[in-house]
Amino acid sequence: MLNCHARRGVSIVAVQAALLASSSGAFAQSSNTVLPAVTVEAPQAARAKPVTRSPRQRSASAGRAAKPVVPNASTSAPTQNRTVTASAARDGLNQAPAGQTATTIDRSQFDNRPSFSVSDVLRDSPGISIKQGNGPRDFGISIRGSNARNGFGIRNLVIFDDGFPVTQPDGLSRSDLIDPHAYGAIDVVRGPSSALYGNYATGGALNFRTRPGGTIDGVEYGVDGGSYGYLNNYLAAGKKVGNFEGSLFVSDTRGDGYIGNSWFNTQTVNFLGTLKATPDDRFTVKIINNDLSARLPLRSNLSQYYQNPFQQGCATGVTAAAGCGNVTLNNNGFNTVAGTDKETAVQAGLGRTDRRTIVGGRWEHDFDNTTTWRNQFVFDDRNISQPTGTTSAIGDFPSYNYMSDLTKRGEIFGLESIAFFGAFYNTLTASSDTRNVMPGGNATLGRLSSNLYSETTNYGVRVRQELKLTTSLTAVAGVGWETTVLKGINTAYSYSGAAGITTTTPTVADRQFQNTAPELALIYRLNNEWLFRGRVATGYGTPQVSNLFVVQTGLSGNNTQLQTQKNLGYDIGFDWTPNSALKLSATGFYEFFRNEIVTQSTQTPGVTFSFNAPRSEHRGIELAAEWKFYPGWRFMAAYTYLDEVYTEYVEALAKGTVFSFNRAGNKIPGISPNELTARVGYDEFAGPLTGLGGFVELQWKDSFYMDNANVLKAPGYELINVNVHYKTDLVSDTFRSLNLFLEVRNVFDRTYIASANNITNTVSAAGVQDSASVLASTAPGSIYAGSPRTFVAGMKVAFK
C-alpha cells in the first residue's frame, strides 16, 4: 500500500501496472492477475490514457519490466480488475492484493457532493456499515459486521493512509483525522486478512489514498457550508518537480451540531512526498495531524430517543425537558458523602479535546530488476482528554511501527512467480488516567478513579507466494505468524469518608498470544467478461489491554481471562463485465468465529465491557452494480445481507443471584441484516449545459437487535438524498476549473437512529429477563439520532 509514480524513463512499468486491471470504479474486485504492485517512486509523467489488456497480453508483457514489482509491506499486491492511468499506476501499491475480495471507491463518486466524513463515501462499498461514534467525524466502520458491536472507534479491521498504518498496535483506529476531500480513492478489503495485515484484521482492511501531487498540479481551494452552522474550508496543493512529487491537504471544519451539546472544531493536515534519489532508491514521507475540540451529548435510551431525539431543552438537570439524558456526579469529586448532582451533558461540559500526530518514512531499494528491499517506520501519537460521562479518560499513547520486506519476481517450475517475505515490529507504551467528573461545568475534574499502565507489542513475519498456473488461473498462498505481548497494571482508587481516605486496588495482567493465519485463493478468468474468485482465509484479534480490567458492571476489576478471537472464512464470487456500460459483482461468504470478542455497554455511562462468545457464525451476500444504461445516465448500487448468530454462548446475569441464559441461536446484536445504497444520476456531456448534473440516492438500513437476548430492536430507516452539481473548465491564466454543488440530505426529514450500541440484558430477583419496555427505559443510553433534513452547498476552484 505504498504510492508509485509513473515517469518517462520507466514507462514500461506504468504499462505493467495497467496490465493488472480490467475494470474500474466502485466495485473493482480481485482478479486473476499475479503481478503485485509496481513500486516506482519517481515523478509522474503526463497523464496517460487508460490502458486495458487481455489476459494473454498481460502474460506477454509480464517479463519486460524495467523495474521490479513490489508488494506493500502491509499488503503485498495491488487491487486488480481496474483500468489504470498514469495517476492510477502511481497509486498501485496502495490497492488491495490479488486474491482478496475488494472494492475500490473512486473519487468520481464523491467529488461533486459534500464529503464531511467517511460515512459519506464508504457506503458505496458492499460489506460496509457505518454508525456515529463519539464525535463529529468519529464513526464506527464495520466490514461484514466486524465492528458493529464496538462502542466507540474502529476495531477488528486495519486502516492505512497511503500504505502507512493508522491503526495503532493496540488495534484501535479512529476516523477523526479523515477528511474525504484529501483522497483520490479508498480501497476496501473484505474478509479475514491476518495473513497480510496481522493482528486485528478479522474483518479486513481499508486504505485511503491521497491524491498524487502531479494530478493536482497546482492549488485547489474549496468551501462547504450548510445547516447547523457547518463550514469546511479546505485546500489541496500538489506538484511534480523533477524527481520529487508532493501533495498537501489542509482543512478547517466546524459546526454547531444538530444534537444539543455537539458543536465541534477540527483541523487536519495531510502531506505525502516522494523523492527518487537514485535510479534504485526512493524515499517517501508521510505526515498527518488532526486537532479536535468537540462537545459531546449523552447517548439516549430508546424511550428518550422517541421523546427527544435531538436532546433539545437540556441545559440543566433541574429544568431539563423530557427525554434529556443525565449523569450522576459526586459533589466532592470522589464519593457520595457530600451528595450527588444529576447534570446534563451541557451542564457538565462533556466533550473531547484530542490530538493525533502521525509521521512516517519509507525507503525502497532495487537490488536488480527482480528484487526490491523496503523499510518503513511510523511514529503515531494519540493524545486524549475525554470527559464523556461520569469520568474522563486522559492520556498520551505514543506508538512505533517498523517493517522490512523483500519481494522477488521470477519463475518456479516455469510458472510466473512473485515471492514475498516480510518482518515487522510495533509497540505502544502508555500511562493513562481515568478521573471523576464533578459538578461545576466545563468538565471539572475530581480525583483519580484509576490509572492504567499498559504495554502492547506485536512482532512477526509474513510469507506470500503468487503463481500463474495458466494464462487464466492464478493461485495465491500466504501465511502470517505473530506474537502479541500485553502487559498492564490497573490501579483502582476508592475514597472513604468526608476526608476521602484513599484505598488502591491494583490488578496485573501479563499475557502473551501466539497466532498463525494462513490463506489460499484461486482466481480464474474464463474470458474477458467473466472472472471467478474463491478464497479461504483466517483472521485473529487479541484483546486490548484496557479490556482486561473492566468487568460486567463497568467498574475496574479482573477481566484478564479474555482470549484471542479467531475466524475462518470462505469466499466465493464472480465479476461480470459484458461491456463498458455494465459491471456486476457478487460475493457470498461464510465465516466461523471462535472466542469472538463482543462489546456491550454497562451501567456506567461511557464504559463498555468485553467478553468472549465461544462460537458464532457470520454469513452473508455482497452485491455491487454499475450500469450506464443511457448516455449521461448512471446507476450504482451496493447491497449487503448479513446473518450472524451465536452458536455457543451462555451469558451470566446477576440480581443478587447469578442466573445463566443460553444465547445459542440468537442473532448477534448490532448487526443490521440488510443495508443498501443506490444512486441514479445524470451528467450532461455535450452542449451549453456540459458539466451540469445531479442524482437521487437511497440509503436503507434494516432494523437490528440491541441485546443478546434479542428482546429490543433499534428501528431501521430509509433516507433520500438529492444532489445538483456543475463543473466547468475555466479559460484563464490563473484558474483551471470551477465546481459547484447543492445537496439536500434526508429530504423527507425522517427521524432515525445513526448509532445504537449494544446494551446489557437485566433480570428480576426471580431470574426472569426484563421485557423490551424495561430495556427501552434503562439508563444509561446507547443511541445517537441521525441528522434531520440538511442543506449543504459547496464550491471548489482549481488554480494553475
Image: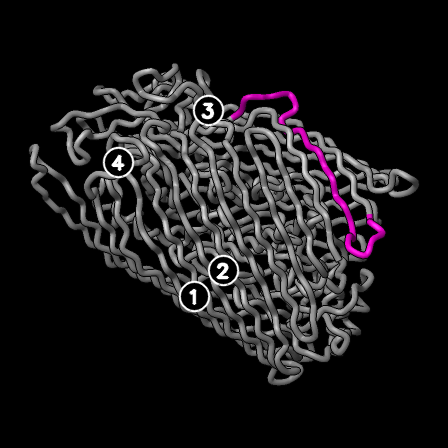
Badge 4: how crowded within 10 Å, few (<14), some, or many (20+)?
Answer: many
Instruction: Residue under label 2, please give it.
Output: 165
Residue beneath the point at 51% across and 23% down: 715
In 3D space, how far apart are the residues under numbered discs 3 and 2 (Cα atoms)?
36 Å
In this picture, which residue range is highlighted in magenta? 729-752
Badge 2: how crowded within 10 Å, few (<14), some, or many (20+)?
Answer: many
* Frontmost residue, 97 versus 250: 250
The answer to whether residue 410 is magenta is no
Mark 1–mark 2 CB contact (< 8 Å): yes
Sequence order check: which comes first, mark 1 or mark 4? 1
Q: Is disc 3 placed on a helix, strand or loop? A: strand
Percent x, y for residue 351?
38, 37
Instruction: Residue under label 4, please give it.
Output: 437
Mark 4–mark 3 CB contact (< 8 Å): no
Mark 3–mark 2 CB contact (< 8 Å): no
Sequence order check: which comes first, mark 1 or mark 2? 2
Badge 1: how crowded within 10 Å, few (<14), some, or many (20+)?
Answer: many
**Residue 413 appears in which quarter of the rendering?**
bottom right
**Residue 4 appears in which quarter of the rendering?**
bottom right
- Type of amino acid at the residue the image marks with label 1: Asn
Pair 2/4: label in front: 4
Instruction: Residue under label 3, please give it.
Output: 713
Sequence order check: which comes first, mark 4 or mark 3? 4
- Type of amino acid at the residue the image marks with label 2: Pro
